[in-house]
Image: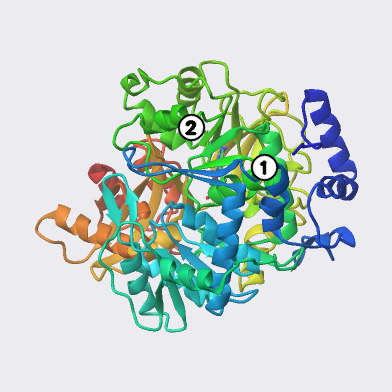
Amino acid sequence: MTYPYQIKSLEAYHKAYKDSIENPSDFWAAIAENFVWKKKWDKTLEWNFEEPKVEWFAGGKLNITENCLDRHIDTLGNKPAIIWEPNDPKDSSVILTYKELLFKVKQFANVLKNNGVNKGDRVCIYMGMVPELAIAVLACARIGAIHSVIFGGFSAQSISDRLIDAQAEFIITCDGAHRGNKIIPLKSVVDDALINCPFVKKVIVCTRTHTAISMIKGRDLWWKEEIKKIDAIGNPDYPAEEMDAEDILFILYTSGSTGKPKGVVHTAAGYMVWANYTFVNVFQYQQGQVHFCTADIGWITGHSYIIYGPLSAGATTLMFEGIPTWPDAGRFWEIVDKHKVDILYTAPTAIRSLMSCGMEFLKDKDLKSLKVLGSVGEPINEEAWQWYYKNIGKQKCPIVDTWWQTETGGIMISNMAGVTPQKSTFTTLPLPGIEPLLVDENGTELLGNNVSGNLCIKKPWPGIIRTTYGDHERCRTVYFATYKNLYFTGDGCLRDEEGNYRITGRVDDVLNVSGHRIGTAELENAINMHSGVIESAIVGFPHDIKGQGIYAYIIFDKMHEDANLTRQDIIQTVSRNIGAIAKPDKIQFVSGLPKTRSGKIMRRILRKIAEGETENLGDLSTLLDPNIVSEIIEGAL
Ligand code: WT7
């Protein structure tokens, strides 16, 4: 496979960028020629941001799995598509060639069909990082079912919220998942979720941990047994379903500043083109390389850069089941050496956590196979950047700092490895097709360089969010209504004297904890579920490893004698309602919250106190009860 659209020099980048902005339709039509279509499109782009409506390659017919699998069989059939590395280094890894992966995807597509899953049906996938997860995702895409993958760290309540929102009647899960020395009881969590979801018809369970589970007659099925039924019929062929370019490929839930998480919708053709194009260009992927993205497939990073981007490019993608610090903090480096990883794509939080474990875990590691390093999920601080560059990349590997979001489908602003200049802590330049724009609060564009403001994007790119599932109005208000005719990212951003972009963090009420998005309103709602909680306010504070930590101010009714026990109760409530990833790091009990006379909590003050600032709290004169501030400062943790 060759990549005629791979940009190989700075001049070529500038030219591609210019072409893409001056004539987006021609530019993307030419890129789209590099894919397999069942029928070519009629119109490359149709859009308006008012509704919003975005259609890429309308009238085109395709199936993304033909682009990820079938088209590689002649040339790459016996090459590894997936290398799976288990949680425990003592267990053996698994390699699936493109031929084997296609076989398994067809086989499981038949299992889905056999169980009544049809094109357009929503299938929820709640699994650990096992090869069957990738197979399940691709099998859904093969038959045209819409997958909604839920990260294994979410609670039963979170799952049922998502099942109800998507009206998903099918679930694919595992008995359990290995994560370090822990086992996550996935099936049992699903069982709890299903108490509220009687509309779920089938649950297919893949065996991984051999944990005891309860299988409900008529509803729950073993993956293995279902495969046997298909094998008994004979040849498990499954021609790829013909999909419209704008048919939904998947839903992925993500948190925002208000309400429950929303289902971000991506569609078949545009997403495919964007995931592939960004993968090939940002990482400068070369045929035969091994790509290791350490994210979980439960997040967009895993969708785009473990599955769809690499496989559509014919790459070898490495899927790791475990965690970076078990059995010790050398696990990533051991995997890099074992599988001769060329491209390593991870998050600043992982880098900081491994950095804090010391150099001894790097002592016997070679890391010579590495050519490109990547960072994603949150701003990377200078110290972590330098450590990554020096100790992992040995000052030879470019680092791509990739800014993007669940809603953007793929990377938006990033340097291209070895092609466009890197600059530590800067995501640098926009990819072709992306027109970033900084605005002030009033929506006035900030022109020129050396300015900072709120980051917006001017025109649609192929991977842009199409809607929020079941609620198009929410999509409009959240992303397209803040500033007229612009997509609003929710991020603050600075443009330096050379036009490089640096993301400064969220400007809305969304926290980024270890690269995970957590809405403060969602978290407050979860905490307020506790019978003793009268009111709560959540803010972020700088955290050495997580980037941001969660600080909870809580007005509590009847405390246990031991305040720590009350704290444990609250943490339990959060774990039950959202999941362990949203547990507060600090809980301070207060007798009141700083509010304006109109009853609005002044988070600015709470944020400053959480950061350790006790003076310069700004204007307190509009507060209903200014005394509360000194009480909160006194009790600050
Ligand atoms: C938010 C999106 C994109 C996949 C992982 C997270 C922050 C993401 C960077 C980066 C600074 C970054 C932004 C963004 N973010 N990448 N390279 N530098 N900030 O996806 O959960 O949708 O979160 O993550 O704040 O809005 P997500």
Viewer-side residue, 443 vs 266: 266
Q: Label 2 vs label 1: CA separation?
A: 18 Å
Does the CB distance between marks 2 and 1 fall below 8 Å?
A: no
Which x, y percent locates residue 325?
A: 33, 36
State the scheme by which the image is colored. Answer: rainbow
Residue ID at (25%, 71%):
531
Residue under label 2, please give it: 339
Please, what is the three-letter code of the amino acid marked with disc 1?
Leu
Residue 9, image x and y in percent?
A: 78, 24
The residue that disc 1 covers is: 76
Q: Position of residue 96 (x, y in %)?
A: 53, 47
Task: Name the image quarter holding the C terminus.
Answer: top left
Quadrant of the rendering where the N terminus is positioned: top right
Residue 546 placement (x, y as % from top left): 39, 39
Left or right of residue 215: residue 22: right
Q: Residue at x 34, y 42 (%)?
A: 91
Q: Residues within 10 Å of mark 2 (few under 14, many from 20)?
A: some
Pick whichever of labels 2 and 1 is earlier in the sequence: 1
Residue drawn at x 84%, y 66% is 59
In depth, the one of 348 and 177 nearer the eye is 177
